[in-house]
Image (cartoon, grey):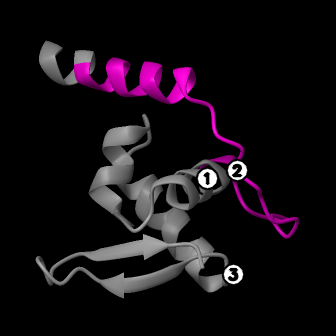
Amino acid sequence: MEGIIAINEMIKMAIAIEPQKVETPKNFDGLPPSAITIYKIVQERGPITSNEIVQLCNLAPRTVRHGLKLLVRAGLIQKLPHLLDMRSSKFYVE
């Protein structure tokens, strides 16, 4: 368990060291802060699976799935099948 926490901390530090400008759309009205965080991760790292998003941030898997559903419904991100694992999907920003 300590190894997982250490890896998550290293990922957070790497993200903090290499800041990238991420443009965010202005139509985030009504979306929870978790969905906005998820959007920024998908924009920066996509195509990405929900499990990969969970590993990058300290959000619960259920929160990530809900945020992704809201973002897809709002048309802010796109969903496509994960060809190597058809049980999951990949998400990306066009």
Q: Amino acid at mark 3?
A: Ala
Q: CA distance from mark 3 to mark 1?
A: 15 Å
SS at mark 3 in the image: loop
Q: CA distance from mark 3 to mark 2?
A: 19 Å
Q: Which residue is mark 2?
A: 22
- Looking at the picture, how far across and down is residue 62, in whole percent? 38, 57
Q: Nearer the viewer, mark 3 or mark 2?
A: 2
Q: Circle 2: is it few (<14), some (14-19), or many (20+) Cα within 10 Å?
A: few
Which residue occupies the foreground of this view, 91 or 59?
91
Q: CA distance from mark 1 to mark 2?
A: 7 Å
- Looking at the picture, how far across and down is residue 77, in whole percent? 58, 76
SS at mark 2 in the image: loop
Q: Which residue is mark 3?
A: 74
Q: Earlier in the sequence, mark 1 or mark 2?
A: 2
- Please tell me which residue is depicted at 61% across the width and 73% down the height of the picture: 71
Q: Earlier in the sequence, mark 3 or mark 2?
A: 2
Compared to residue 69, the image places residue 26 above or below, namely: above
Q: Is residue 2 part of the magenta span, yes or no?
A: no
Which residues fall within the magenta stretch?
7-34
SS at mark 1 in the image: helix
| Residue 85, numbered label | none
Which quadrant is the C terminus positioned in?
bottom right
Q: Are marks 3 and 1 in contact (CB under 8 Å)?
A: no
Q: Nearer the viewer, mark 3 or mark 1?
A: 1
| Residue 40, numbered label | 1
Q: Is residue 32 part of the magenta span, yes or no?
A: yes
